[in-house]
Image: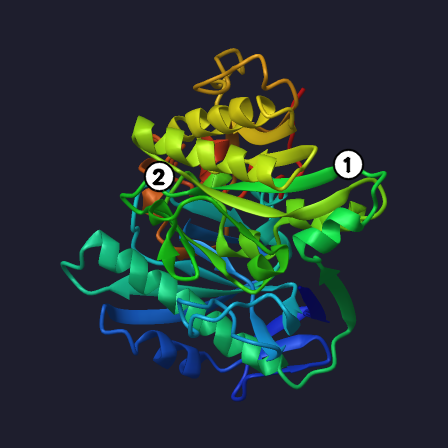
Amino acid sequence: MKLELGYIFIKDIQFSDVSKVEDGTLYVNKEEVKALILEDQNFQKADVELAKPGESVRIMPVKDVIEPRVKVEGPGGIFPGMINKVETVGSGKTNVLKGAAVVTTGKIVGFQEGIIDMSGPGADYTPFSKLYNLVLVCEPVEGLKQHDHEKALRFAGYKVALYLGELARNLTPDEVEVFETPTLTEGLKMYPDLPRVAYVEMLQSQGLMHDTYVYGVDAKQILPTMIYPTEVMDGAIVSGNCVSACDKNTTYHHLNNPVIHELYAEHGKTLNFIGVIITNENVYLADKERSSNWSSKLAEFFGVDGVIVSEEGFGNPDTDLIMNCKKIESKGIKTVLITDEYAGRDGTSQSLADADPLADAVVSGGNANEVIELPPMDKIIGHVEVADVIAGGFDGSLHKDGSITAELQVITGATNEMGFNKLSAR
Protein backbone atom coordinates (compact mmCIF):
# COMPACT_ATOMS: atom_id res chain seq x y z
CA MET A 1 0.00 0.00 0.00
CA LYS A 2 1.41 3.36 -1.08
CA LEU A 3 0.39 6.80 0.17
CA GLU A 4 1.65 10.23 -0.84
CA LEU A 5 1.28 12.97 1.76
CA GLY A 6 1.34 16.45 0.26
CA TYR A 7 2.24 19.07 2.84
CA ILE A 8 0.97 22.65 2.53
CA PHE A 9 2.92 24.52 5.20
CA ILE A 10 0.81 26.91 7.30
CA LYS A 11 2.69 29.91 8.72
CA ASP A 12 -0.24 31.98 9.99
CA ILE A 13 -3.98 31.77 10.65
CA GLN A 14 -6.49 34.62 10.38
CA PHE A 15 -10.24 35.17 10.30
CA SER A 16 -11.65 36.26 6.95
CA ASP A 17 -14.88 36.55 4.98
CA VAL A 18 -13.71 33.65 2.81
CA SER A 19 -12.06 30.44 4.01
CA LYS A 20 -8.97 29.70 1.92
CA VAL A 21 -5.24 29.02 2.02
CA GLU A 22 -3.06 31.63 0.39
CA ASP A 23 0.70 32.20 0.63
CA GLY A 24 1.01 29.99 3.68
CA THR A 25 -1.84 31.67 5.59
CA LEU A 26 -4.98 29.80 6.58
CA TYR A 27 -7.96 32.15 6.33
CA VAL A 28 -11.10 31.02 8.17
CA ASN A 29 -14.69 32.23 7.98
CA LYS A 30 -15.62 32.17 11.65
CA GLU A 31 -19.39 32.23 11.11
CA GLU A 32 -19.29 29.25 8.73
CA VAL A 33 -17.37 27.23 11.30
CA LYS A 34 -19.79 28.18 14.09
CA ALA A 35 -22.73 27.20 11.91
CA LEU A 36 -21.08 23.85 11.19
CA ILE A 37 -20.69 23.17 14.92
CA LEU A 38 -24.25 24.24 15.74
CA GLU A 39 -25.71 21.78 13.24
CA ASP A 40 -25.49 19.46 16.24
CA GLN A 41 -28.40 20.29 18.54
CA ASN A 42 -26.42 18.99 21.51
CA PHE A 43 -24.66 22.38 21.60
CA GLN A 44 -26.47 25.45 22.85
CA LYS A 45 -23.73 27.81 21.70
CA ALA A 46 -20.30 27.80 20.12
CA ASP A 47 -17.44 30.18 19.56
CA VAL A 48 -14.26 29.98 17.50
CA GLU A 49 -10.92 31.42 18.58
CA LEU A 50 -7.38 31.58 17.22
CA ALA A 51 -4.26 30.58 19.16
CA LYS A 52 -0.84 31.19 17.63
CA PRO A 53 2.68 30.25 18.74
CA GLY A 54 4.18 32.71 21.22
CA GLU A 55 0.91 34.34 22.24
CA SER A 56 -0.05 34.74 25.89
CA VAL A 57 -2.93 32.29 25.51
CA ARG A 58 -4.05 29.29 27.57
CA ILE A 59 -6.50 26.74 26.15
CA MET A 60 -8.31 24.53 28.67
CA PRO A 61 -9.77 22.02 29.12
CA VAL A 62 -8.55 20.47 25.86
CA LYS A 63 -10.51 17.49 24.55
CA ASP A 64 -8.80 16.68 21.24
CA VAL A 65 -6.38 18.06 18.66
CA ILE A 66 -6.90 17.24 14.98
CA GLU A 67 -4.82 17.99 11.89
CA PRO A 68 -6.77 19.08 8.76
CA ARG A 69 -6.32 16.62 5.88
CA VAL A 70 -8.14 15.80 2.63
CA LYS A 71 -8.08 12.71 0.43
CA VAL A 72 -7.40 13.99 -3.11
CA GLU A 73 -6.80 10.69 -4.89
CA GLY A 74 -7.51 7.09 -3.99
CA PRO A 75 -10.26 5.19 -2.17
CA GLY A 76 -12.14 6.41 0.87
CA GLY A 77 -11.90 9.63 2.82
CA ILE A 78 -10.35 10.93 6.03
CA PHE A 79 -11.85 9.44 9.23
CA PRO A 80 -13.53 6.42 7.57
CA GLY A 81 -16.38 4.97 9.59
CA MET A 82 -16.71 8.22 11.53
CA ILE A 83 -17.40 10.96 9.00
CA ASN A 84 -16.71 9.27 5.67
CA LYS A 85 -18.03 5.86 4.63
CA VAL A 86 -16.30 2.67 5.67
CA GLU A 87 -13.70 2.04 3.00
CA THR A 88 -10.09 0.98 3.37
CA VAL A 89 -7.86 4.06 3.30
CA GLY A 90 -4.11 4.53 3.25
CA SER A 91 -3.37 4.64 -0.46
CA GLY A 92 -3.39 7.34 -3.12
CA LYS A 93 -2.76 10.99 -2.28
CA THR A 94 -3.68 13.01 0.81
CA ASN A 95 -3.03 16.72 1.28
CA VAL A 96 -2.18 18.05 4.76
CA LEU A 97 -2.36 21.56 6.23
CA LYS A 98 0.93 21.08 8.06
CA GLY A 99 1.35 23.46 10.98
CA ALA A 100 -2.40 23.92 11.53
CA ALA A 101 -4.71 22.17 13.97
CA VAL A 102 -8.28 22.12 15.26
CA VAL A 103 -8.52 22.09 19.08
CA THR A 104 -11.78 21.25 20.87
CA THR A 105 -12.68 22.69 24.26
CA GLY A 106 -15.64 24.00 26.25
CA LYS A 107 -17.41 22.81 29.38
CA ILE A 108 -15.45 19.85 30.73
CA VAL A 109 -16.44 16.35 29.56
CA GLY A 110 -14.37 14.29 32.00
CA PHE A 111 -11.82 15.18 34.66
CA GLN A 112 -8.94 13.90 32.53
CA GLU A 113 -8.66 16.84 30.14
CA GLY A 114 -5.71 19.17 29.68
CA ILE A 115 -4.00 22.48 29.07
CA ILE A 116 -2.20 23.95 26.07
CA ASP A 117 -0.16 27.10 26.77
CA MET A 118 0.96 28.93 23.65
CA SER A 119 3.91 30.58 25.45
CA GLY A 120 5.84 30.37 28.70
CA PRO A 121 7.21 27.26 30.40
CA GLY A 122 4.07 25.23 29.71
CA ALA A 123 4.52 25.69 25.97
CA ASP A 124 7.82 23.83 26.14
CA TYR A 125 6.02 20.65 27.23
CA THR A 126 3.40 20.43 24.47
CA PRO A 127 3.95 20.11 20.71
CA PHE A 128 0.67 21.91 20.08
CA SER A 129 2.08 25.27 21.21
CA LYS A 130 4.02 25.26 17.91
CA LEU A 131 0.87 25.06 15.77
CA TYR A 132 -1.58 27.60 14.39
CA ASN A 133 -4.71 26.49 16.20
CA LEU A 134 -8.37 27.00 15.41
CA VAL A 135 -10.02 26.48 18.80
CA LEU A 136 -13.65 25.37 18.99
CA VAL A 137 -15.38 26.39 22.22
CA CYS A 138 -18.48 24.19 22.26
CA GLU A 139 -20.95 24.50 25.13
CA PRO A 140 -23.48 21.67 25.57
CA VAL A 141 -27.19 21.97 26.24
CA GLU A 142 -28.24 21.56 29.86
CA GLY A 143 -28.49 17.99 31.08
CA LEU A 144 -26.51 16.40 28.23
CA LYS A 145 -25.09 13.04 29.30
CA GLN A 146 -21.30 12.82 29.37
CA HIS A 147 -21.04 10.15 26.66
CA ASP A 148 -23.28 12.21 24.35
CA HIS A 149 -21.26 15.33 25.17
CA GLU A 150 -17.99 13.56 24.34
CA LYS A 151 -19.36 12.24 21.05
CA ALA A 152 -20.76 15.62 20.01
CA LEU A 153 -17.47 17.37 20.78
CA ARG A 154 -15.48 14.67 18.99
CA PHE A 155 -17.57 14.97 15.82
CA ALA A 156 -17.45 18.77 15.90
CA GLY A 157 -13.66 18.49 15.71
CA TYR A 158 -13.76 16.02 12.82
CA LYS A 159 -16.24 18.11 10.83
CA VAL A 160 -14.25 21.33 11.17
CA ALA A 161 -10.96 19.56 10.42
CA LEU A 162 -12.44 18.18 7.20
CA TYR A 163 -13.88 21.62 6.37
CA LEU A 164 -10.39 23.10 6.64
CA GLY A 165 -8.77 20.14 4.91
CA GLU A 166 -11.04 20.64 1.93
CA LEU A 167 -9.34 24.01 1.36
CA ALA A 168 -6.19 22.07 0.40
CA ARG A 169 -7.85 19.82 -2.18
CA ASN A 170 -6.71 21.73 -5.25
CA LEU A 171 -3.48 23.16 -3.86
CA THR A 172 -0.01 22.17 -5.03
CA PRO A 173 1.89 20.81 -2.02
CA ASP A 174 5.05 22.53 -0.86
CA GLU A 175 6.53 19.10 -0.18
CA VAL A 176 5.52 15.49 -0.88
CA GLU A 177 6.49 12.51 1.26
CA VAL A 178 5.86 8.94 0.06
CA PHE A 179 5.18 5.97 2.36
CA GLU A 180 4.84 2.40 1.10
CA THR A 181 4.44 -1.00 2.72
CA PRO A 182 4.50 -4.17 0.57
CA THR A 183 2.44 -7.29 1.22
CA LEU A 184 3.81 -9.76 3.76
CA THR A 185 5.02 -12.16 1.06
CA GLU A 186 6.77 -9.35 -0.81
CA GLY A 187 8.21 -8.02 2.44
CA LEU A 188 9.71 -11.40 3.28
CA LYS A 189 11.89 -11.17 0.18
CA MET A 190 13.09 -7.64 0.86
CA TYR A 191 16.25 -6.79 2.79
CA PRO A 192 17.04 -10.37 3.91
CA ASP A 193 20.00 -9.18 5.94
CA LEU A 194 18.01 -6.70 8.01
CA PRO A 195 15.92 -7.48 11.13
CA ARG A 196 12.18 -7.62 10.51
CA VAL A 197 10.37 -5.20 12.85
CA ALA A 198 6.70 -4.51 13.60
CA TYR A 199 5.01 -1.88 15.73
CA VAL A 200 2.50 -3.01 18.38
CA GLU A 201 0.27 -0.02 19.10
CA MET A 202 -1.80 -0.30 22.26
CA LEU A 203 -5.10 1.59 21.99
CA GLN A 204 -6.81 2.99 25.08
CA SER A 205 -10.15 1.15 25.32
CA GLN A 206 -11.09 0.82 28.99
CA GLY A 207 -14.53 2.34 28.56
CA LEU A 208 -16.15 5.10 30.61
CA MET A 209 -14.98 7.50 27.88
CA HIS A 210 -11.59 5.82 27.69
CA ASP A 211 -12.16 4.90 24.07
CA THR A 212 -10.32 4.79 20.76
CA TYR A 213 -12.02 4.10 17.44
CA VAL A 214 -10.79 2.03 14.47
CA TYR A 215 -12.79 2.60 11.28
CA GLY A 216 -15.59 3.78 13.58
CA VAL A 217 -15.51 0.71 15.85
CA ASP A 218 -14.79 1.10 19.56
CA ALA A 219 -11.43 -0.64 20.04
CA LYS A 220 -12.63 -2.50 23.14
CA GLN A 221 -14.75 -4.59 20.74
CA ILE A 222 -11.89 -5.68 18.48
CA LEU A 223 -9.41 -8.53 18.58
CA PRO A 224 -5.82 -7.47 17.87
CA THR A 225 -5.22 -7.25 14.16
CA MET A 226 -2.79 -5.87 11.61
CA ILE A 227 -3.17 -2.56 9.83
CA TYR A 228 -1.13 -0.87 7.15
CA PRO A 229 0.79 2.07 8.63
CA THR A 230 -0.58 4.38 5.96
CA GLU A 231 -4.16 3.65 7.03
CA VAL A 232 -3.36 5.40 10.31
CA MET A 233 -2.23 8.49 8.36
CA ASP A 234 -5.67 8.72 6.74
CA GLY A 235 -7.54 8.74 10.05
CA ALA A 236 -8.41 5.05 10.44
CA ILE A 237 -7.66 5.45 14.18
CA VAL A 238 -9.08 8.39 16.14
CA SER A 239 -9.16 9.45 19.78
CA GLY A 240 -12.32 9.39 21.85
CA ASN A 241 -10.89 9.18 25.32
CA CYS A 242 -10.41 11.22 28.46
CA VAL A 243 -7.17 9.74 29.81
CA SER A 244 -4.74 12.08 31.53
CA ALA A 245 -3.76 14.86 29.15
CA CYS A 246 -0.03 14.24 29.33
CA ASP A 247 -0.20 10.77 27.79
CA LYS A 248 -3.41 10.98 25.78
CA ASN A 249 -2.97 10.07 22.12
CA THR A 250 -5.02 12.78 20.45
CA THR A 251 -6.23 12.28 16.89
CA TYR A 252 -3.31 14.49 15.83
CA HIS A 253 -0.92 11.99 17.43
CA HIS A 254 -2.47 9.12 15.51
CA LEU A 255 -2.32 10.97 12.19
CA ASN A 256 1.35 11.82 12.82
CA ASN A 257 2.43 8.74 14.79
CA PRO A 258 6.20 9.28 15.26
CA VAL A 259 6.94 5.56 15.76
CA ILE A 260 5.50 4.84 12.33
CA HIS A 261 7.39 7.75 10.76
CA GLU A 262 10.70 6.71 12.34
CA LEU A 263 10.27 3.07 11.30
CA TYR A 264 9.61 4.19 7.72
CA ALA A 265 12.72 6.38 7.88
CA GLU A 266 14.84 3.36 8.89
CA HIS A 267 13.15 0.92 6.50
CA GLY A 268 15.73 -0.58 4.14
CA LYS A 269 18.56 1.02 6.10
CA THR A 270 18.73 -0.58 9.54
CA LEU A 271 15.51 -2.64 9.57
CA ASN A 272 12.67 -4.08 7.51
CA PHE A 273 9.42 -2.44 8.68
CA ILE A 274 6.67 -5.05 8.30
CA GLY A 275 3.60 -3.19 9.58
CA VAL A 276 1.45 -2.32 12.59
CA ILE A 277 -0.35 -4.63 15.01
CA ILE A 278 -3.10 -2.83 16.90
CA THR A 279 -4.27 -4.18 20.23
CA ASN A 280 -6.54 -2.85 22.95
CA GLU A 281 -6.16 -2.08 26.66
CA ASN A 282 -8.71 -3.85 28.81
CA VAL A 283 -10.17 -3.73 32.30
CA TYR A 284 -10.70 -7.41 33.12
CA LEU A 285 -7.95 -10.01 33.38
CA ALA A 286 -9.50 -12.42 30.86
CA ASP A 287 -9.67 -9.66 28.26
CA LYS A 288 -6.06 -8.67 28.92
CA GLU A 289 -4.99 -12.30 28.50
CA ARG A 290 -6.94 -12.67 25.26
CA SER A 291 -5.57 -9.52 23.64
CA SER A 292 -1.95 -10.11 24.67
CA ASN A 293 -2.23 -13.70 23.42
CA TRP A 294 -3.35 -12.40 20.05
CA SER A 295 -0.74 -9.65 19.74
CA SER A 296 2.07 -12.12 20.52
CA LYS A 297 0.57 -14.68 18.15
CA LEU A 298 0.43 -12.14 15.33
CA ALA A 299 4.02 -11.05 15.95
CA GLU A 300 5.11 -14.69 15.73
CA PHE A 301 2.94 -15.36 12.67
CA PHE A 302 4.50 -12.42 10.83
CA GLY A 303 7.96 -13.77 11.56
CA VAL A 304 9.39 -10.57 13.00
CA ASP A 305 12.64 -10.33 14.92
CA GLY A 306 11.62 -7.37 17.05
CA VAL A 307 8.70 -5.11 17.96
CA ILE A 308 8.21 -1.66 19.43
CA VAL A 309 5.26 -1.51 21.84
CA SER A 310 3.68 1.82 22.79
CA GLU A 311 1.21 2.30 25.64
CA GLU A 312 -1.55 4.83 26.23
CA GLY A 313 -2.44 5.84 29.76
CA PHE A 314 -1.02 4.47 32.99
CA GLY A 315 -1.85 2.25 35.95
CA ASN A 316 -4.23 -0.45 34.75
CA PRO A 317 -2.81 -0.41 31.16
CA ASP A 318 0.67 -1.09 32.57
CA THR A 319 -0.50 -4.69 33.04
CA ASP A 320 -1.42 -4.94 29.34
CA LEU A 321 1.98 -3.48 28.46
CA ILE A 322 3.91 -6.03 30.52
CA MET A 323 1.71 -8.91 29.31
CA ASN A 324 2.45 -7.97 25.71
CA CYS A 325 6.14 -7.73 26.51
CA LYS A 326 6.37 -11.11 28.31
CA LYS A 327 4.40 -13.05 25.72
CA ILE A 328 6.15 -11.55 22.70
CA GLU A 329 9.56 -12.08 24.30
CA SER A 330 8.57 -15.71 24.99
CA LYS A 331 8.28 -16.17 21.22
CA GLY A 332 11.94 -15.22 20.84
CA ILE A 333 11.06 -11.74 19.61
CA LYS A 334 12.83 -8.74 21.14
CA THR A 335 10.66 -5.94 22.51
CA VAL A 336 11.22 -2.26 23.14
CA LEU A 337 8.55 -0.56 25.25
CA ILE A 338 7.55 3.12 25.18
CA THR A 339 5.77 4.38 28.27
CA ASP A 340 5.83 7.29 30.68
CA GLU A 341 6.24 7.21 34.44
CA TYR A 342 4.18 8.11 37.48
CA ALA A 343 7.07 8.05 39.91
CA GLY A 344 5.77 10.51 42.48
CA ARG A 345 6.60 14.17 42.73
CA ASP A 346 10.10 13.41 43.97
CA GLY A 347 10.67 10.65 41.40
CA THR A 348 11.29 7.92 43.98
CA SER A 349 8.08 5.90 43.70
CA GLN A 350 7.55 2.83 41.50
CA SER A 351 7.22 4.17 37.96
CA LEU A 352 4.82 1.55 36.57
CA ALA A 353 2.06 -0.48 38.18
CA ASP A 354 3.55 -3.70 36.77
CA ALA A 355 7.03 -4.89 35.88
CA ASP A 356 8.98 -7.93 34.68
CA PRO A 357 12.66 -8.78 34.08
CA LEU A 358 11.89 -9.27 30.38
CA ALA A 359 11.01 -5.58 30.14
CA ASP A 360 14.69 -4.69 29.86
CA ALA A 361 14.46 -2.22 26.97
CA VAL A 362 12.17 0.66 27.92
CA VAL A 363 11.98 4.23 26.60
CA SER A 364 10.52 6.73 29.08
CA GLY A 365 8.47 9.77 28.15
CA GLY A 366 9.16 11.41 31.50
CA ASN A 367 7.61 11.61 34.97
CA ALA A 368 4.02 12.87 34.83
CA ASN A 369 3.99 13.62 38.59
CA GLU A 370 6.61 16.35 38.36
CA VAL A 371 5.19 19.63 39.68
CA ILE A 372 5.34 22.69 37.43
CA GLU A 373 4.39 26.35 37.73
CA LEU A 374 2.38 27.88 34.89
CA PRO A 375 2.32 31.69 34.90
CA PRO A 376 -0.88 33.66 34.23
CA MET A 377 -1.84 34.26 30.61
CA ASP A 378 -3.44 37.35 29.07
CA LYS A 379 -6.18 35.28 27.44
CA ILE A 380 -8.00 32.10 28.45
CA ILE A 381 -9.88 30.10 25.82
CA GLY A 382 -12.29 27.77 27.59
CA HIS A 383 -12.71 27.46 31.36
CA VAL A 384 -9.74 28.11 33.66
CA GLU A 385 -11.66 27.10 36.83
CA VAL A 386 -11.27 23.41 35.99
CA ALA A 387 -7.58 23.67 36.98
CA ASP A 388 -8.48 22.45 40.48
CA VAL A 389 -10.27 19.30 39.29
CA ILE A 390 -8.49 18.01 36.17
CA ALA A 391 -6.09 15.10 36.59
CA GLY A 392 -2.81 16.51 37.89
CA GLY A 393 -4.48 19.49 39.51
CA PHE A 394 -5.68 19.76 43.09
CA ASP A 395 -7.65 22.06 45.35
CA GLY A 396 -5.69 25.30 45.20
CA SER A 397 -3.93 24.67 41.88
CA LEU A 398 -5.48 27.81 40.41
CA HIS A 399 -4.16 30.98 42.08
CA LYS A 400 -5.86 34.38 42.24
CA ASP A 401 -3.47 35.89 39.69
CA GLY A 402 -4.36 33.18 37.15
CA SER A 403 -1.18 31.16 37.61
CA ILE A 404 -1.45 27.40 38.10
CA THR A 405 0.58 24.96 40.21
CA ALA A 406 0.00 21.39 39.07
CA GLU A 407 1.58 18.13 38.04
CA LEU A 408 2.94 17.78 34.53
CA GLN A 409 0.05 15.48 33.62
CA VAL A 410 -2.22 18.53 33.13
CA ILE A 411 -0.37 19.49 29.93
CA THR A 412 -1.65 17.93 26.73
CA GLY A 413 1.00 15.67 25.21
CA ALA A 414 3.71 16.36 27.81
CA THR A 415 4.74 12.73 28.39
CA ASN A 416 3.21 11.15 25.29
CA GLU A 417 3.90 7.44 25.05
CA MET A 418 4.45 7.47 21.31
CA GLY A 419 7.47 9.63 22.06
CA PHE A 420 5.76 12.66 20.50
CA ASN A 421 7.60 15.02 22.82
CA LYS A 422 11.11 15.86 23.99
CA LEU A 423 10.98 14.56 27.56
CA SER A 424 12.64 11.35 28.67
CA ALA A 425 14.42 9.91 31.70
CA ARG A 426 17.30 7.60 32.55
The amino acid type, in three-letter code, at marker 2 is Ile
Q: Residue at x 30, y 64 (%)?
A: 152
In the rendered view, does 93 fall on the left or right side of 321? right
Relative vertical location of residue 153 with respect to residue 337 in this rendering, above or below:
below
Q: Quadrant of the N terminus?
A: bottom right
> How far across and how far down the image is residue 346, in percent?
52, 15
The residue positioned 30% from the left and 45% from the top of the image is 110
Distance between mark 1 and mark 2 Cα atoms: 43 Å
Which residue is rendered at x = 66% and y = 22% of the image?
361
Residue with the mark numbered 2: 390
State the residue in front, 369 or 152: 152
Q: Position of residue 66 (x, y in %)?
A: 51, 61
Seen in the picture, residue 370 relative to 253 is either above or below; the reply is above
Q: Position of residue 368 (x, y in %)?
A: 50, 29
Q: Give me the disc on residue 108.
A: none
Locate the C terminus by quadrant.
top right
User: Considering the numbered disc 2 on the image, is that residue within a helix, a strand or a loop?
Assistant: loop
Given residues 24 and 415, the one toward you in this image is 415
Q: Residue furthest left?
A: 143
Q: Nearer the viewer, residue 417 or 74?
A: 74
For the residue labelled by badge 1, is the local secondary structure a helix, a strand or a loop?
Answer: loop
Which colour scheme appears in the figure?
Answer: rainbow
In this rendering, does residue 395 appear at all?
no
Mark 1 sits on what residue? 195
